[in-house]
Image (spheres, rainbow, N blue to C red):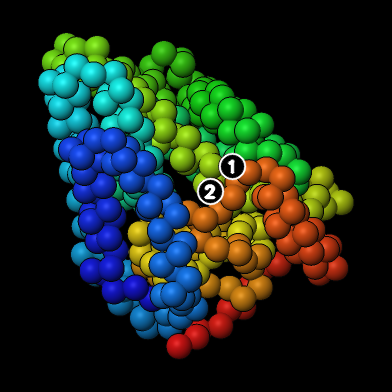
Amino acid sequence: MQKSVNYCLPYAVAIVPGLSFVVGGWGYSIFLAVYLGFPLLDFFIGKTFHNPTTNEEAALSRQWRYAAILWGYSVVQLSYLAAGSYLVCLRQNWFDTWFFAMNTGLLIGAASITVAHELIHKTNRFERGLGGFMLALVCYGTFKIEHVRGHHVNVATPKDASSARLGQSIYHFVPKAIVRNVLNGFRLEAKRLKRKELPILHWHNEVLAWTSLSILVAIACYILTGIHGLAFFLVSSFFAVLALEIVNYVEHYGLERRQLNSGRYERVSPLHSWNASEKLANAGIYNLQRHSDHHAFPTRRYQILRHYDQSPQLPTSYGGMIILALLPPLWRKIMDPLAKEHMEKLRQSEPDPVDFEYKSLS
């Protein structure tokens, strides 16, 4: 497992968009160094398969500094939003505005969504609220609702907007995923309010609350920093959401849960999500690559997520997989055989496992 200081890596990476804005020119493609650099470094640094013991899990879960690392990233996100809007307002250059917003979205926004994803699964109201706030700052507040009540219920089934089918290209998946996630967020919240016998236009409507916050931030950016500041906010939000949905594509590509005779789908287990255990990348995205354990146990905190040998394993970390996904023929050549092999193993096993053994490796 990682030490808490290792999870401060996203704070160090946060300088990259600012650096690209300062140096200009070649600096606009610095983000490629991060997406390509992490897999290359992980090739030399290697993987970690260590799982915490029961006693270690209890101790790690109680250590507040792991949660504080997540909370602090909201300050980074807010700082970039304020400083970025102000700087592009001063420059008044559309080329600078676009590429600075792109870099910020792909790095700061993507990291913020990763943090928010961790927070919205927690059981206390403060962390769930902070997660929703961070998502609203990238105009994707609906993700808080759809991800928890939609994706985690329907993952690896045709009902899920965030589970890519075998053979589906990223260019077909991402636009549909974004539209369906937004619509599903509103639909799920409407169903919740109906059960409470409340109208859709009610202050209890969480989706409307987060969407209203996004609109207010957009208005504030325009009033305070003009059209360039507004463009920075919207473009950086777009690329943050784009990065999120590309990661969703990678995490579940080609994996399916079997439908039982009852019509229900088998229980979600660590066999239904792609896993990766590269040490550096997991430090940079709060063990998100141990996605198999996250789906089996959604409330488990990031510092104690576990590796399963039986989970389907990605060829490399998310950075490399994202680049690969952008090249559909190469992606399918590498990933389709792996997905088919794993699905064949699933078909030969007993469905709906209640308990799942894992190794505590040193």
Q: Amino acid at mark 1?
A: Leu
Residue 73 placed where, x, y %? 23, 48
For the residues bearing labels 1 and 2, Cβ distance under 8 angstroms: yes
**Position of residue 232 measured from the top left corner of the image (x, y, whole percent):** 28, 24
Q: Secondary structure at mark 1?
A: loop
- The numbered disc on residue 76 is none
- Corner quadrant of residue 9: bottom left
Mark 2 crowdedness (10 Å alpha carbons): few <14, some 14-19, many ≥20: many
Residue situated in front as seen by the camera: 240 or 211: 240
Seen at 14% across and 25% down, the residue is: 86
* Residue on which the image places disc 1: 326
Quarter containing the C terminus: bottom left
Q: Which residue is mark 2?
A: 322
Seen at 71% across and 67% down, the residue is: 353
Q: From this viewpoint, is residue 16 visible? A: yes
On screen, 332 above or below 158? below
Residue found at x 83% / y 63%: 344
